[in-house]
Image (cartoon, rainbow, N blue to C red):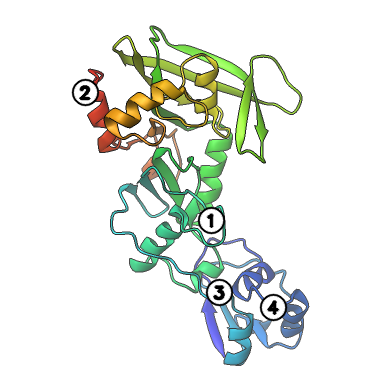
Amino acid sequence: MRELMFQEDAGQRLDKYLQKYLKLAPKSFLYRMLRKKNIVLNGKKADGSEKLKQGDVIRLYLSDETLEKFREEDRSYPVWPDLEIVYEDRQVLMVNKPAGMLSQKAAPEDVSLNEYLVGYLLAGGQVTRESLAGFTPGVCNRLDRNTSGLVIGAKTLGAAQEIGRLLKERQAGKYYLALVKGTIRRGERIRGWLMKDRKKNQVTVSREPAEGGAPIETAYEPLASNGAMTLLKVELVTGKTHQIRSHLAGTGHPLAGDGKYGDATFNRYFRERYRLNSQFLHSWKIEFPAMDAPFDALSRRTVTAEPPELFRKILQAEGLEG
């Protein structure tokens, strides 16, 4: 027999929880066990449609062999000692992701920021292997692999839903630092339509409405310029794949170091002089709106992540420090 105490946010159905806990078990098996009272909720027969609340006790009168058979092999959640957490409360944490790290897995064998977040929470006792059956903490906003900066991680289902809503409704301000080719003297808000080629993992931007295109909007203002390049503060109004990189390239101001949308000669300068091998794009600030409990710790808060040391070195050497 195994006893599970539900500690996640209320509202999850019992059958959905069981499907996560016994991932390899057929649904028919789970419902049969419920009918036979081999799985009970708070000591009583259940049919699976019950909505769980914190403190509910689920008992599985199943052999260890059966549990092992239907439990997915434990995933590895490594602890990364250099994980830079810039903000944390009971609901969320925010990490300064380095360039080169995936936000989420692209292939089963990958290790991404998601796994490191769970590893951190497991090591600190904030979650348990059992609680992961109800909800697995994870990132709310994804950055490209070679983009550094702020990533929001949700510790609870409620946080994942609330942060997801804020981002979808564009209530949180997202600001980036970008170093681009050429001189930009004034700020601008630009719009367009973005088309994605999934096979090539590449996008194109059109100024006019295009079939299959998603409307995009990007705002920017110059912070410093030396004539050859400009440091921009970029607001990501909409959040589409490669939006900042492709949108700025389409205006004739590609990002330094961007091998996909950038200028080869411009990139070579940074690669040879500074060994910059990824785009100069950093998720810098996130501004949260007024928020009610249990998210009031984030209410009207601005969270900032320092750019990588290499970026700061480049800005200093090029006379672009603000």
Q: CA distance from mark 3 to mark 2?
A: 60 Å
User: For residue 92, which numbered disc appears in the image?
Assistant: none
Please tell me which of labels 3 and 1 falls first in the chain: 3
Quadrant in the picture for residue 116: bottom left
Q: CA distance from mark 3 to mark 1?
A: 17 Å
Disc number lying in front (3 or 1): 1
Q: Is residue 49 above or below residue 170?
A: below
**Which element type, helix, strand or loop, lies under badge 3?**
loop
Work out which residue is located at the far top of the displayed protein and give it.
Answer: 185
Quarter in which the C terminus is drawn: top left
**Amino acid type, callout 1:** Leu
Quadrant in the picture for residue 277: top left
Q: CA distance from mark 3 to mark 4?
A: 22 Å
Disc number lying in front (4 or 2): 2
Q: Is residue 171 above or below residue 205?
A: below
Query: Is there a contact, CB below 8 Å, between mark 4 and mark 2?
Result: no
Question: Residue 263, position in %: x, y?
Answer: 46, 22
Residue at mark 1: 157
User: For residue 56, which numbered disc appears in the image?
Assistant: 3
Residue at mark 2: 317
Please tell me which of labels 3 and 2 falls first in the chain: 3
Residue at mark 4: 25
Quadrant in the picture for residue 21: bottom right
Please tell me which of labels 2 and 1 falls first in the chain: 1
